[in-house]
Amino acid sequence: MTVARRRKAPVQARSRAMVEQILDASIRVLSTSGYAQMSTNRIADEAEVSVGSLYRYFADKDEIFDELRARVTDAILGDLTGAITDAAGRPPYDGVRAVVAALVASLQRHEPVMRALVNELPLGTQSNVLPEIERGLAQFTRIYAVQQLPDLPRAELDARIYLAMGVTLNSCLRIALERPADLDEDHLIDLVAGMLAIGLTA
């Protein structure tokens, strides 16, 4: 998805409040109807503003969604940064589990946007819903793996990190957005953390 620039950046407090009102309404529309049914008219109705007012700040629904995606990415990165900082001093498995649990919780907090990203983008084997999140995770994983296995050849390290990113993001998305009611979330997080810890320390 191409990131578009909003037509008019809000400066005054009233304008900023209207942008927040529009974005909050957009999340509610995503929650109830999904991205395919989201339109500027529906968002304006939900926000209780005129479509003309909406167009002062956003050209179309894609521009609104780009803003939501950017905000969600920043929020998830913030959550991950805190979790990674806390994980640094823990035993290997505990640290990995803390990061996985934090990512699952953050994805759940932003479920409407994440669900739209996962369901609306064409996903192939090389696609990445959250490239910024993967880059942040990859940096942590590389540091962690080098600390645990300082003599591991570079090619092997790169291979393990490449696969670890796929396991982490796909597993966390599945747990956060698609977990069947009969599967325990904590147990699934335990399993993911166990797989990652083995792959990055053995």
Image: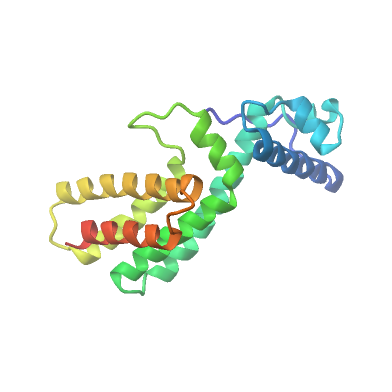
- Is residue 139 rendered to the left or right of residue 69? left
Could you tell me if residue 147 is visible in this image? yes
Give the color scheme: rainbow, by chain, secondary structure or one colour. rainbow
Residue 166 relative to residue 42: left or right: left
Residue at x 75% of width, y 40% of height:
25
**Residue 41 image offset from top left, x and y in percent:** 78, 25
| Residue 139 percent coordinates (x, y) | 35, 54
Residue 37: image quadrant is top right
**Residue 28 appears left or right of 125:** right
Q: Position of residue 105 (x, y in %)?
A: 52, 57
Residue depicted at 14% across the width and 57% down the height:
152
Q: Is residue 11 shown to the viewer in this render?
A: no
Which sits in the foreground, 20 or 116? Answer: 116
Q: Quadrant of residue 162?
A: top left
Nearest the camera: 169 or 152?
169
In this rendering, is residue 26 above or below 167? above
In the rendered view, does 10 fall on the left or right side of 100?
right
Q: Quadrant for the C terminus, please.
A: bottom left
Q: Residue 57's spot in the image, x, y percent?
A: 76, 32
Is residue 38 placed above or below 194 in the rendered structure? above
Q: Residue at x 52, y 50 (%)?
A: 107
Residues 176 and 166: in front is 176
Q: Residue at x 15, y 49 (%)?
A: 156
